[in-house]
Amino acid sequence: MSRQTIVFRVGDDDKRTSGQRLIGAHVTEIEFKNFADIDHQLGKIVTELQKLGLQPSERALDLAILAAAVTAADTRIERAIESQDAWTREIELCIPVLEPDLWTQTAPLLSKTLTFLTGDRWELTFRARSRSVKTLIPPSTGQLTSRPNSVCLFSGGLDSFIGATDLLAEGEKVLLISHYWDSVTSKHQGICLKALAEKFAKSDFQKIQARVGFKTRTVDGSYGEDTLRGRSFLFFALAALAADGIGGKVIIHVPENGLISLNVPLDPLRLGSLSTRTTHPYYMSRFNDLLNQLDLGSSLHNSYRHMTKGEMVASCTEQQFLRDEAKNTISCSHPANARFAHDEDRRQAKNCGHCVPCLIRRAALLHGFGVDDTSYQLEDLESEILDSKSAEGLHVRSFQLAISKLRDRPGRAKYDIHKPGPLTDFVDDWADYETVYRDGLEEVGRLLKNVVSRPLR
């Protein structure tokens, strides 16, 4: 294992000491010469915002640059090689910013937030930008034709599709923000965005897709990492950048069902950082604290936090539209994996059908519509006994055990909901979280009623 420091350099004259503190760390330097390099790394999101007539601040850009550094560390420092326990990495980020004193004050909150999110130990140091890049963002030349009222995250998954559909059906003037790295995610986002544009052709909404990521071997000695626990930090930061361009008190909608948001571990092996926390209420509250400390004005809000995915499907404003288009959304936990099946001599990318998000998705569509038109790699869960030691049966069995335990002791729900992280920011919501946890597991239980999963070897 080794400690890892990633130093961002911005500008040809950024030669000063990085300020690193992690003694004995392996240092990776990532250089950006100017704004064009930064904007390219952020998927040209600033340029796209400016085309809409929106001008974000340098402070919001610094948050996005920090998020890019988090992404570089999280996706390119391999846990198996660089961690001390096959999971926990020691990571330092050294970032040039316009207001180093302000950012240094946020460092403890940032470290706390990122540690909760990814399960790693984070050290953050900030220094002043070099003279040539005191100002990075050029003045906008775009014409503002319509100012959005809010921002909505749009991943291309079923929840975000429902969230966007509901907002547009309500007449909300919304800016949809997407980011991707792999072609599968990009493709599904594009299909879904086209469907929304056709359905709501008379509505006033805009969209931006940003491709953000780092090549393999960015960090010397590490090929890459696929747990991707920090991905929502980038997503939230890009949305905050867009919201800052809009100006004022802007709501950033985070459409996510309550079961996934809580993500209570199904078994002891999924405790802690092994269970994703990308939209956990505690994490979202800390990110809102960060936005408040930076005085960026926007705030995250999940209006579906007390709803199961099936309830989201059943309550969607445009039922027939959702039923027609749900099959084009992708909910899989690893959308970039090579999961292809021959379909009329063509290789089609598919949801796997057996990971945790896929099982929740399948249960939700059955709950809402009574039928699921999605094509899965594992098409029929009931056709044969699933090996609980294989990928196809592992999460099925975990769900079945968790459901059985909860049915035997329904009262445990009031304790289980606190296992992934604190809910102290939402004391008045505890009963609602218990309900969504129980109801969400029962949705999956109905899906798996006749499915058999056990060790076959």
Image (spheres, grey):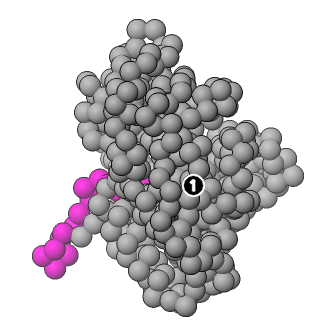
Q: Is residue 74 left or right of residue 366?
A: left
Q: Position of residue 145 (x, y in %)?
A: 56, 78
Identified at 47% across, 53% down, the residue is: 138
Q: Residue furthest right?
A: 428
The main secondary structure of the magenta stretch is loop
Quadrant where the image shows the C terminus: top left
Q: Is residue 32 left or right of residue 368?
A: left
Query: Residue 353 or 384: which is nearer the viewer?
Result: 353
Number of other residues with Cα within 10 Å of mark 1, as a class: few under 14, some 14 to 19, many 20 or more = many
User: Magenta span has 343?
Assistant: yes
Task: Evaluate whether residue 101 shows in this view.
Answer: yes
**Residue stretch in magenta:** 331-347
User: Identity of the amino acid at label 1?
Assistant: Pro
Q: Is residue 396 left or right of residue 181?
A: right
Identified at 54% across, 33% down, the residue is: 97
Task: Evaluate whether residue 355 shows in this view.
Answer: no
> Quadrant of residue 389 in the image?
top left
Q: Position of residue 80 (x, y in %)?
A: 35, 27
Query: Residue 439 or 409: which is nearer the viewer?
Result: 439
Which residue, given by chain and number where applicable, does mark 1 sit on? 56
Q: Position of residue 425 (x, y in %)?
A: 80, 44
Say if 448 sits above or below 416 in the image: below
Q: Is residue 111 left or right of residue 282?
A: left
Say if 440 sits above or below 232 in the image: below
Identified at 40% across, 46% down, the residue is: 35
Say if 16 sits above or below 400 in the image: above
Q: Position of residue 395 (x, y in %)?
A: 46, 51
